Amino acid sequence: MPLNANMNQSVTCPFCKLQHTFSSNLIDEFVCPKCHVGLRPNIDYNTIAPTAYQPMPDDGSRVNFGSKITFKNEIYTVVGKVRYQLDNTIITKWVLVNNTGLLYYLFEFINGYALVFKNLNPIEKKLLSNIKPSKKLNISPYNSEFQVKAIYRNFNTLISGEIALETIDFETFEAVELTNADNEFAFIQSSFDKIPTLYSGNFIEFKDLVITNPAKQNTELSTINCATCAKPISNYLKGKAFSLVCSNCQSHFVFDKQRNLKLKNQFKKPADLDIPIGSKGEIEGKIYTVVGTLLKCEEGTSYRWKEYYLRGEDGKIVTLSEFNGHYNLIEEIDYFDEIKTFNSSINYEGSTYHIFNKYKVDLLLAQGEFSYQIVNDSVSKVSEFIAPPYILIYESDKNEARYYHGRCILPKQVEKAFELAVIPEQIGTGATQTMFLGLNYSLFTKICFGFFILLFVIQYYFALTNTSNRVYQEAFAQSNMNDSTKVLVSNTFQITDAPTALQFDLVSNVNNDWFGVTIELINHTTGDRFEVDKTIEFYSGVDEGESWSEGSKSESVFMSQVPAGTYHINLYPEWGSIVKENNSFEIWVYKDVAMWSNFWVTILVGIILIIIHYLRFRIFESKRWMESNFDSPYVTKLEE
């Protein structure tokens, strides 16, 4: 970390007379934002011809010179800006000064920020000699390993405001971008004859920064005239655009050092767009603008898909991919552990992702603008892992290793978001498509069995406690029954809860005989009648010296949904034996009982649903994995 570096020395621009006071004695030069000339913090330098620099283009950044940035109770002032035009993208490095004059740097990418300082720990050149994407490096003083995300070659550096010359390299240099699992970030600048410079810190979210006096957002659409046909090309990304493809003549341009269009190649025909460039749409509560589209194919096959490059209102870029009418919304993630070529599955945020596809990518057509070089010298290799509705993508070439995470977007969402009259017809089952009215089979089964256990506990509890809900009990004998009506009439009793289930327990003294009864429950007020029947049989004896018995002297029968009220029971009993004095029975009535029949019906229905869902799941997954070169993990275990 640099030492305390406050200073108050001033310089005056000889052209516009702008007076500037340096914010730190670690600053070497001030580049006038109006005249683009460099002034040194030495009074003698005001009297000689100043250094002229190339003007800085407007890139629509929300950071601004003079802004105060508060992050974790530390206050920084934005005093300078360095813009690296790399071979594949553009990175901005803002120069920050804290209240003691120490220098920090805010790296700004198209999709995020990193707050860093110049690390004084030396980096040996031999450490970078065999560097390649995904390689792991140990960087002092960090305990965790860093992973190489990208290797760039810088061919143009633009500066404005205050700069420290020792951290600026105007010559061509190599840059290495690194990340790790702790959300830490490192950036190495390595020139031929200089000791590599290391910047290290952490990725941060823009929402976590408190900025006073931010840059005003220029929402007006600008254009750049095509260098081939002179037709205007919409410039939504402004100074952050790296590649542009004219929709009129299909010329693909990149910017040279003077920010002039340089022809890279020319596509043979215009891209066929379902969503036109410039379309605005709302997806999951966020507004996006289509700024570019790509038509890609899997090398050596006829598989083709479209990728729409979407810019959010916050400036972040996401990709909407479409293949055979199936959509995924995909965004880059900063870090994922290295994926080996033999990985059959990986874990990410608690979910297991299975390998679905591996291929090399060819770019066929393009239109619009992009923040990176869309045509590389090496063909990108892609590995796709799925955990529907999510997808994890690993894309690599000789210079970069990037990770993307996406999720399935329904065609109706896309159709509604961009107000499309026609969308591509869905063909087959998508890699991340979810089954209609279907949960993950394993999760569904666990939920069902959890519900079964809970239902059993509740049922068993009510079965144990139903004796406290007895509303009626009485004993009867056949000798008490009127011979003409063949009916026994109970005393009246009250049912106060409504509606409720009633349980009738019957006990008879039958022996080697049977007893049957019709139970008629009658509501005194409404006259409503509820009727059930039950038979009791019990037989026993001795056969070849062995005692045996069959049946039971007690049985239960249920009535459901019985309203509250005053009731009595008419009983119509029958016995197999005609000896009246020996025939008797008792009846108990309980309310609020748990009906085991309902429990078993529920279990049966649940098991049937599990079987149906399993069959649907297997059929659906079989169709999904027909599009893959790998075996379904739900059918055959993948080889390690």
Image (cartoon, helix red, strand yellow):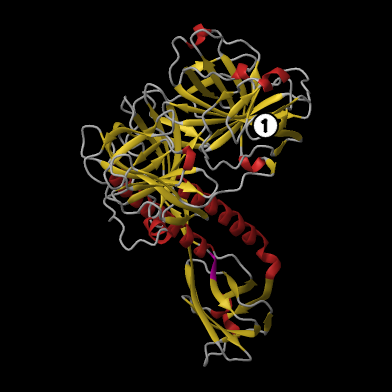
Instruction: Tell me residue 149's x, y (percent).
Output: 48, 25
Where does label 1 land, which residue?
79
Instruction: Tell me residue 84's x, y (percent).
Output: 51, 27
Location of the N terminus (image quadrant): top right
Location of the C terminus (image quadrant): top left
The quadrant in which residue 33 appears is top right
Judge from the rendering whether residue 628 lies leftward or rightward of residue 164; answer left or right.
left
Counting every numbered tag in the picture gives: 1
Amino acid carrying label 1: it is: Val
Judge from the rendering whether residue 118 lies leftward or rightward of residue 377; answer left or right.
right
The quadrant in which residue 593 appears is bottom right
In this orientation, which residue lies closer to the viewer: 484 or 225?
225
In this orientation, which residue lies closer to the viewer: 539 or 507?
507
Is residue 629 visible in the rendered image? The answer is: no
SS type, badge 1: strand
The quadrant in which residue 3 appears is top right
Mark 1 Cα within 10 Å, few/some/many (few <14, many 20+)? many
In this orientation, which residue lies closer to the viewer: 274 or 601?
274
User: Is residue 3 located in the magenta-colored stretch of the structure?
Assistant: no
Judge from the rendering whether residue 82 lies leftward or rightward of residue 411; answer left or right.
right
Main secondary structure type of the part rendered in magenta: strand
Query: What residue is at 49 percent from the left and 26 percent from the top?
Result: 337
Q: Give the range drawn in magenta.
A: 553-557
Residue 231 drawn above or below residue 91: below
Instruction: Tell me residue 559's x, y (percent).
Output: 54, 75
